[in-house]
Each structure stands twice: as C-alpha cells, then as structure tokens.
Image (cartoon, grey):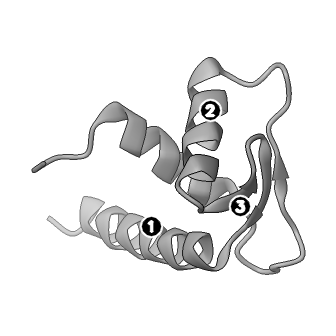
C-alpha cells in the first residue's frame, strides 16, 4: 500500500486524541461519537494499540505509534507555512 486509506487516517486521528502528557489518562468513545471514530477505536483495539474497544488506554505499542503519529503531524504542520 502506498497511501493512507481513510480507515488509517481515522485511526491516526484517534491516536492523536490520546493525552500525550500522562500515561494515566485515557479516552472514552461515547455513544454519540461519529461512527468512523467508533470503528477506528474498534480496529485499534483489535490491533492491540488500545486497551478497550471503546478507548481505554494506549498499550505499549499504541504509545509508540501515537508518538510517531505526533511526529508526522508536527513535521507536516511545520511544512505548511514553510513554502
């Protein structure tokens, strides 16, 4: 695969919503969340990146992936005004 598909983008966006300042804080996907966020949480849980199908906490793998996602976001955002 050479591009991020919409499911991957939804998963990355959800990972970016997890607090990065404390591993003791998690996320809860509420019943009124968009279906794409509910589905993304379920997929992240199946992949072992979060502890519950409706959020919870990041696993060790989830922490690593979320950290990479933040680096990618930061790099891409920095480039917006650069050129």
Pointer 3 and pointer 1: residues touching (CB < 8 Å)? no
Q: Position of residue 9 (x, y in %)?
A: 40, 43
Q: Which residue is mark 2?
A: 37
Which image quarter is the C terminus in?
bottom left
SS state under label 1: helix
Q: Residue furthest right?
A: 24
- State the residue at coordinates (67%, 54%): 17
Q: Position of residue 2 (x, y in %)?
A: 10, 50
59 or 17: nearer the eye?
59
Q: Is residue 17 above or below residue 57?
A: above
Furthest toward the left, the residue is 2
In the rendered image, residue 25, in percent from the top left (x then y), is placed at 87, 68
* Quadrant of the rendered image containing residue 35: top right
Q: Which residue in the protein does label 1 denote?
A: 69
Q: CA distance from mark 3 to mark 1?
A: 11 Å
For marks 2 and 1, the one nearer the N-term is 2
Q: Could you tell me if residue 15 is visible in this image?
A: yes
Q: Estimate how packed mark 1 is, as few (under 14), some (14 to 19) or many (20 or more) residues with alpha carbons within 10 Å.
A: some
- N-term mark: 3 or 2: 3
Residue 34 horizontal side relative to residue 4, left or right: right
Picture coordinates of residue 20, whole percent (x, y): 70, 75
56 is higher (above) or lower (below) than 23: above
How far apart, in angstroms, are the residues tagged by discs 2 and 1?
17 Å
Task: Answer left or right for 56 relative to 77.
Answer: right
In the rendering, which numbered label is found on residue 18?
A: 3
**Nearest the eye: 18 or 56:** 56
């Amino acid at each position: 695969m050479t591009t991020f598909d919409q499911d991957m983008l939804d998963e990355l966006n959800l990972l970016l919503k997890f607090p990065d300042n404390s591993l003791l804080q998690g996320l809860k996907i509420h019943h009124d969340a968009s279906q794409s966020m509910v589905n993304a949480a379920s997929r992240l849980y199946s992949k072992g990146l979060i502890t519950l199908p409706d959020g919870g906490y990041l696993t060790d793998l989830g922490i690593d992936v979320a950290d990479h996602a933040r680096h990618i976001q930061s790099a891409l955002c920095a480039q917006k005004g650069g050129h």
